[in-house]
Image (spheres, grey):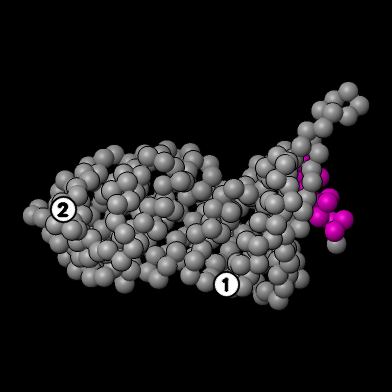
Amino acid sequence: MMRENIGEIDSMVVKDVVNFLHPLNPGAVYNGTVERTGWKIDFVTPYEIQGRVEIKADAWKKYNCGVGRRDIGFNATRIRKVFSTMKKGEVAEIEIDDNCIIGRWKNLNLTWTHLLEETTDESEDYLLPEDLVYTVDISLSKHHIKSIKMHLAAIEKETERWDPWNGVVLEYEDKQLKIFVYRIENRYQNGAWIPAVEVRSVIELSRFDVHKGRTETIAIYPLKTFKRILGNVKNGYLKLAFGNETPLQVDFEIRKGIHIEAHLMPANPTEKVRRKIIDHLNREV
């Protein structure tokens, strides 16, 4: 096909997308599609998180895609390097052909040829489980998100001399969401190393009505990925859906027109550690 002009996009839109995608799996080439409604990029970090970023048409300065659906390989690490020289407010003109995507600004042609790269991490081992059942489905406000970030930061500051915290626990019961962080530390006791669990409350958020099933759910997830998600929520809302032994589904916007849906895989503590965590939470009641 002939080269076609797709439109013009603010450099900050691209930077926000690639700054989210790059740390998840540096150097990975993700499945992407160019469509009339915008671009969609599927991402995965094996056994940790997977999802999709949508750069919708209204996120662009101008968007005039007429090529229909096109599959591409999206190398966030490479594009991140290319756009690192652009400053806030600068606009890139984007063209596409059979072999490459061309970004042009300041009378320079910057070309990255990743359309024909093979995508990585396509193993079926990384697919989401079938028949997911979410028993909790709630939306957090900008105030909620800010409060969670502040509480997490306070815990980190108080425990900076300790080992990193291992995970986050989400507990929903009686219209109340509780968020805890925990860590596991092996301690020598009675001639053996025994896992000791310490749990810290982060915040309690009340008056949520769920729209699905059971109203008592405890779910455990890796803290580092949960924090990474929170750090990218900048447009005022975050939707969470979770249940026992299911991935945590999150929906949010980085900025207007950039929508992300992701699934955070459950943490996998041993049954003994899991029991210690739940016993601690029961004592808190």
Q: Which residue is mark 2?
A: 108
| Residue shown at the point (36%, 56%) measured from the top left | 15
Which element type, helix, strand or loop, lies under badge 1? helix
Q: Amino acid at mark 2?
A: Leu
- Specify the segment rendered in magenta: 273-284
| In the rendered image, the vertical position of residue 274 relative to residue 106, given as above or below | above
Quadrant for residue 160, please give it. top right
- Tell me residue 176's x, y (percent): 73, 69
Q: Please indicate whether residue 185 sits to the left or right of residue 258 in the image.
A: right
Q: Which residue is mark 1?
A: 142
Q: Please indicate whether residue 285 sits to the left or right of residue 270 in the image.
A: right
**Closer-to-camera residue (149/189):** 149
Q: Is residue 202 visible?
A: yes
| Residue shown at the point (59%, 73%) measured from the top left | 141
Mark 2 crowdedness (10 Å alpha carbons): few <14, some 14-19, many ≥20: few
Q: Amino acid at mark 1?
A: Lys
Q: Which mark is residue 243?
A: none
- Tell me residue 5's x, y (percent): 15, 62
Quadrant for residue 161, please give it. top right
Mark 1 crowdedness (10 Å alpha carbons): few <14, some 14-19, many ≥20: some
